[in-house]
Amino acid sequence: MEVSHENYKSYHQYNEHEKYVTKRDKKKGVMVVPDIPELWQVKVDINTLNEDEQKAVQRLIQKIFHVLSYLGRKDREIIRAIYVDQLTEKQLAGRQGVRQQTTHRKKQRIIEGTQIN
C-alpha cells in the first residue's frame, strides 16, 4: 500500500509525540485512566450525597476536564460524540465517512493514551 510523504510524516510525528508524552508522564508518575465506559452513564443527584461524597465527585469532574484539556480538537469531538452525545461507533463512523473499525481504533487510542494525575 502506497502512502503519501505527508501522511507518513504526520504518522511519524504523531508517534514521536506519543513517545515523548509517555516518557514525560512516566517521570511525573501519571497513571492511565482505565476504559470503564459504564461510568460515563452514571447519573447522580448530587443533592443526595453527603459533603465528602460531593467533594469526591467534584474532584473527579476536575480530573476529567483536566484530561480532556490535553486532547486535540478531533479527539475531544470523538469522545464527546460517543460518551456525551451517545452516538454508537457506527453512527460516528458514518458521519465521518470512515469504517466503524477505524472509529473504534481511534477511540481506543484516545482512551489508552489519556492519562490523569
Image (tube, helix red, strand yellow):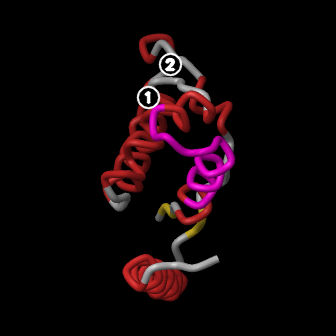
- In terms of depth relative to the viewer, which is nearer, 41 or 56? 41
The verdict on residue 97 being magenta is yes
Q: Going by the image, does 2 lie left or right of 21?
A: right
Q: Which residues are drawn in magenta?
A: 95-109
User: Which residue bears the numbered disc 1?
Assistant: 54
- Expressed as whole percent of the image width and height from the top left, the position of residue 101 reads 68, 48
The amino acid type of the residue labelled 1 equals Gln
* Residue 28, visible in the rendered structure: no
| Residue 41 sits above or below residue 34 on the image | above
The amino acid type of the residue labelled 2 equals Leu
The structure residue drawn at horizontal position 38% and vertical position 47%, both measured from the top left corner, is 76
Q: Residues within 10 Å of mark 1 (few under 14, many from 20)?
A: some
- Expressed as whole percent of the image width and height from the top left, the position of residue 97 reads 49, 40
| Rendered image: mark on residue 49 | 2
| Rendered image: mark on residue 29 | none
The structure residue drawn at horizontal position 51% and vertical position 82%, both measured from the top left corner, is 15
- In terms of depth relative to the viewer, which is nearer, 56 or 41? 41
The verdict on residue 101 being magenta is yes
The structure residue drawn at horizontal position 34% and vertical position 59%, both measured from the top left corner, is 72
- Expressed as whole percent of the image width and height from the top left, the position of residue 102 reads 62, 51
Q: Going by the image, does 75 lie left or right of 101?
A: left
| Residue 79 sits above or below residue 68 on the image | above
The quarter of the picture where residue 88 lies is top right
Q: Going by the image, does 99 lie left or right of 68?
A: right
The structure residue drawn at horizontal position 63% and vertical position 32%, both measured from the top left corner, is 90
- In terms of depth relative to the viewer, which is nearer, 18 or 25? 18
User: Which quarter of the rendered picture does the N terminus lie within?
Assistant: bottom right
- Mark 1 lies on a secondary structure that is helix
The quarter of the picture where residue 38 lies is top right
